[in-house]
Amino acid sequence: MTAGADLRSLAACGCEMTSRDVDLFVIGAGSGGVRAARIAASYGARVMIAEEFRVGGTCVIRGCVPKKLLVYASRFSDEFEDAAGYGWTVGEPTFHWPTLIANKDREIARLEAAYTSTLERFKVELVKSRAVLEDAHTVRLTASGARVTAKTVLIATGAWPHLGPKIPGLEHAISSNEVFHLPELPRRIVIQGGGYIAVEFACIFAGLGSKVTLVYRGENILRGFDDDLREHLRNEMRGRGIAVTCGHTVTAIDRAGDEFVTHLSDNTTIAADKVMFAIGRRPNVMGLGIDKLGVRIHEHGGIEVDDYSRTSVENIYAVGDVTNRVNLTPVAIREGHAFADTLYGGKPTRVDHADVPTAVFSEPELGVIGLTETQARERLAKVDVYKTSFRPMKATLAGRPTRSFMKLLVDGTTDKVVGCHIAGPDAGELIQVIGVAVKMGATKADFDATMAVHPTAAEELVTMREKAVSYGRAAAE
């Protein structure tokens, strides 16, 4: 096996010279694994990384990046309609799904090449193979049968779509893996699920012209998000023609020629060209060989790790969705970087998983950080709630009935803003900036003291003065 670092660089980073083939073996070349490998190598470690599919992982290959490209495509239908209100005459637009998918594929190939080039530049040895642990220090590459010994092993294998209980006809359902490679746009699609992926693809397909039915077993979509935000999005989706059916599940799927008949738990049926299940993802822990090594699995299904991403086996670590902590790409990247800083950079680093901003690229878009109203009331002695709903300025001339929604949750004792929830155009961009303020501990007074930028939607965040409601002991006195 080749080694990527010379003796001087190894000495500089404090890497212990042993008879091992490499200092670090990374299983999985997704966002977290690639970042960990690159940073470890920059400190002088000899690093090898194994990937059985494509470099870049779920986010780059079949997740966040291609999904966002499809989101952009789906929003042009609104732009064409809205243009008339602003004096533009636009001919009847047509959409060609194969062109979108081909262009998406070219961009994903470019990004994969960039990831691969980065690994090469940092002298990380990439092996295209599945990797299985035979003992705590030995990895077997299934493609060749070769064995590699490593002082430290990092597991960064992510998560995999979960289709739920076995039901009749389950083999007819597609997941978020296959949806990016459909040969044609389905005229009608049934999507089961109520999380990020389900609502985003419901809005994508609706924007591209499909008739969409979203089926979710819970009382409302986006479990875990703020209740006001959940209700706002559901109403907006229904206003866009998406049938949102809560409190039900798909119980069977029948094939009838070129279409599918989806049976629901209320004994109704829906005909569709495609059925997609997006009911969640499970940590990708199977077949790694970790069960026989004593690597503990948490009750939530992910690999159990400490604050430094170390597993129950001293030299084995894990980062990203396989640990089932906060399953977001930027979190995996931060965890991978912190791991490398801790082991190879002499900078012990814990990752703070509190107040992580996130976005849902639905229509309208959502951006959130911090506590929901329910969480705030459970944890704080007093909670002040500020919220507003308004018609976006662009929608006025366009004649579109959509509305934006914003909500701030404030600790009534300290005046700190502990939660921010936004639905509307560019909510993802807004929450990234607001996230800095919330992470720094900004107070409502700090928000109020900030001059508004007019005319913008974001100015509402610094001009909300009247409390919608207050909860807690102070409110009862």
Image: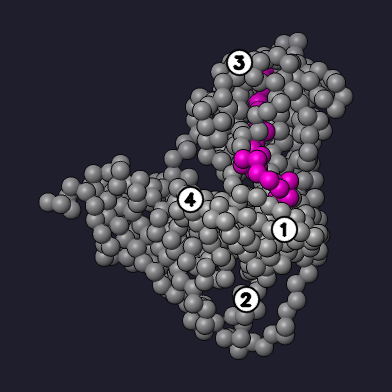
3D distance between C-alphas at marks 1 and 3: 44 Å
Residue of label 2:
79
In the rendered structure, which disc, 1 or 2, sits on the residue that comes first in sequence? 2
Q: In the rendered structure, which segment of residues is drawn in magenta?
A: 151-173
In the rendered structure, which disc, 4 or 1, sits on the residue that comes first in sequence? 4
- Going 61% across and 49% down the picture, which residue do you hit? 251
Q: Is residue 410 visible?
A: yes
Say which of marks 2 and 3 sits in front: 3
3D distance between C-alphas at marks 4 and 3: 36 Å
In the rendered structure, which disc, 1 or 3, sits on the residue that comes first in sequence? 1
Which of 442/300 is in front? 300
3D distance between C-alphas at marks 2 and 3: 55 Å
- Disc 1 marks a residue whose amino acid type is Phe
Say which of marks 1 and 3 sits in front: 1
- Going 51% across and 28% down the picture, which residue do you hit? 299
In the rendered structure, which disc, 4 or 3, sits on the residue that comes first in sequence? 4
The image position of residue 303, as x and y in percent, is 58, 27
Q: Are marks 1 and 2 in contact (CB under 8 Å)?
A: no
- Disc 3 marks a residue whose amino acid type is Gly
- As helix, strand or loop, the secondary structure at mark 4 comes to loop
Say which of marks 4 and 3 sits in front: 4
Which of 139/117 is in front? 139
Residue of label 1:
260
- Going 38% across and 47% down the picture, which residue do you hit? 371
Please give left or right for residue 190 compared with residue 434 in the image.
Answer: right
- As helix, strand or loop, the secondary structure at mark 2 comes to helix
The image position of residue 347, as x and y in percent, is 54, 26
Task: Give the quarter of the image for residue 296.
Answer: top right
Say which of marks 1 and 2 sits in front: 1
> If the image is split into quadrants, where does the N terminus sit?
top right
- Disc 2 marks a residue whose amino acid type is Glu
